[in-house]
Each structure stands twice: as C-alpha cells, then as structure tokens.
Image (cartoon, helix red, strand yellow):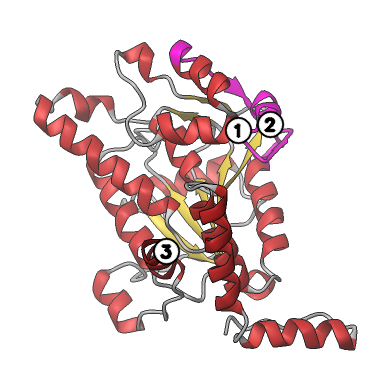
Amino acid sequence: MSAVRGAVMRSGRILSQPSVELMAARGVFARPIKRLSTQVSFTQIRSWCSDGPIADQAEVRLSRLDGEDNGIVEVLMCRERARNSLGHVFVGQMRELVSSLHHDAVVRVVIFKSLIPGVFCAGADLKERAQMRNPEAELFVHGLRSLMNDIAALPMPTIAAVDGFALGGGLELALACDLRTAAHSAQMGLIETTRGLLPGAGGSQRLPRTVGFAIAKELIFTGRRVGGEQAAELGLVNRSVPQNQTGNAAHKEALSLAREILPQAPIAVRMAKVALNRGSEVDISSGMAIEGMCYARLIPTRDRQEGMAAFIEKRPPRYIGE
C-alpha cells in the first residue's frame, strides 16, 4: 500500500508555476507567439516556418491561448524540411518544453499540433539515424522512449491533433497523448517492421492498450497504415472529422475537445488522470485504493466547495485550481 500511495503522491502532485525568470533563463518563452488563427492558409504557415516569425528555426514552440481559451497551450511542431521527423534538435527542444509544462499549474489542456501541411510527424529522422553507430542509435531510441514517457506523464490532459501523416515515432508521439483527433485524410501506422525494426518509443506497449492486443499485433506485424475514419473505428483516435480546405480540421476538433475540458475543475481533472493511468497498470483492488487516495486529495480543495455551492445555487461553477 505504501508503494501505491507513494506513486500516487509523486504522480498526482500539483506543483506551482515556475517563476517568469526561470522560464526566461531556460529560453522557453523568450519569444512567445500568438495564437494561430484556424483560418490561416498553408502558404502563410509555410512562410512562418521558413522565413517568418519562426525564422530562428526553433523546431518546437509553445503557444499560450488567451481570452476564453486561457489555460489551453499548444505545442507547435515546425520542422518543415524534414516533416517534423524526430531528429536530435527536435527531440531536445520537445523535451525542454514538456519539462516546463510538467511544473506549470496554470495549464489545463495541452494540444500537440503540426504547422507543416499534410503531416503531423513523419517519425524517425532516417538520415540522422543512418549516420549513427549501433550504440548511438540504441541510446537515441532510449531517449525517444524517455521523451514519450515524459509526455504521457504530463499531469494535465493532452490531445494530439493529427491532420496528416503520423508514422512510426509520429504515431508513438500521438499515442503518448491522452486523446487524439484526426482528419479523415490522415494516415497513421507503426511501420517499423517495414524498416527491419519494431516500435521502440513505446508503440508496442501503448498501441495494444489503446486498440487491443489482436488489432495491435496485426497493425505492427504488417506495418499497415490506417486512415482517420478507420482509426476512429479501431479506437485509435477519439474523434475523426472530414478534412477542410485549410487542412486543420483535426486541430479545430482538438480545440473543441479542449474547450469541453477547460471549464472543469483542473485539480479534479488531473487527479482523474492519475486514477485512470495508475489504475490501468494494477489489479482492480489496487486500482480502487488509488482511486480512493485521488478522491481524498480533492475533499479539502476550494474547487470542490465551489462545485457544491454552484450546484445548490444553480449557477456555473468558477474553478480556480485550488
């Protein structure tokens, strides 16, 4: 029981937001960018990725939404020439941003999206990988696996908006998120066996937990790709929608989903994530104990009192995350 309790307390703690000075020292938010309009054209996006506001070639950036969407943060992937493939720089920048989000109590939902038309993440950077010796490649894949674990361990809900190809490590990144939206035209697959490999960044473990073992084995053994509609039928994604003219239908659906989560009590949502994730890893009796401890964490919160008061007074609750 003490081990279970320790795991919950470590995973479920809600930490305070780091100081602005610390964030600036890390360089994470040195040049924040404004929310991108959902009506932006592909031509504009390409300009931003190559010679516009993202001209310093940061391959991964954060965008904090404001107004009614305050609390939603988007992780923007923009490695245009390599189709967001998982190279050293991309992975290093992603790791830094994910680390900063882990300790940010203000963030309520995180959306992972691509700024590259037609692609979410193309998977491993095979050009970089080809230059690695065997020990180097093994170490790099270990780092990828660690990154995906870090994404999965984020305390707030995460959503992958798949508007294009998510192959190999790209699908593993999406699987590390809690929820996934996809355009019908998206293509997803763990294609590693077609390259003489197996999914090495968590895919062999997360895919069967998402779609079931028989389906996961079929997809991994064959290296087959599936479209957005079939992915929804298999339970690989939560929602699949027709692609629109601007090519961001999955992102718009992810925003819609995030906006459904946003009004809910943030500590309760985070504790629910702990209960779900930790409970799925143990037997039902231990899972009940985890649920009980997560529930106990919510009893003294001001948000719980606000929820009860709002219900009695027949008004929308105003949660503050305390």
Mark 1 touching mark 3, by CB under 8 A? Answer: no
Horizontal side of 215 relative to 233 (left or right) equals left
Tell me how far mark 1 sits from mark 3, CA to CA: 33 Å
Instruction: Write down the region rendered in magenta.
Output: 221-249
Say what secondary structure mark 2 lies in. helix
Question: What quarter of the picture does the C terminus occupy?
Answer: bottom right
Q: Which residue is mark 2?
A: 232
Kind of residue indicated by mark 3: Met
Kind of residue indicated by mark 2: Ala
Horizontal side of 160 relative to 69 (left or right) equals left
Question: What quarter of the picture does the N terminus occupy?
Answer: bottom left
Q: Earlier in the sequence, mark 2 or mark 3?
A: 3
Q: Residue at x 67, y 41 (%)?
A: 238
Observer-nearest residue: 74 or 195? 195
Q: Is residue 274 above or below residue 57?
A: below
Residue 250, percent across and down? 65, 42
Horizontal side of 12 relative to 262 (left or right) equals left
Dot 2 surroundings within 10 Å: few (below 14), some, or many (20 or more)? some
Q: Which residue is mark 1?
A: 236
Mark 1 touching mark 2, by CB under 8 A? Answer: yes
Tell me how far mark 2 sits from mark 3, CA to CA: 37 Å
Q: Is residue 244 magenta?
A: yes
- As drawn, which residue projects farthest toward the right? 314
Residue 45, percent across and down? 51, 46
Observer-nearest residue: 43 or 296? 296
Say what secondary structure mark 3 lies in. loop
Mark 2 touching mark 3, by CB under 8 A? Answer: no
Q: Mark 2, mark 3: which one is toward the viewer?
A: 3
Residue 290, percent across and down? 52, 62
* Residue 151 in sight: yes
Q: Which residue is mark 3?
A: 1
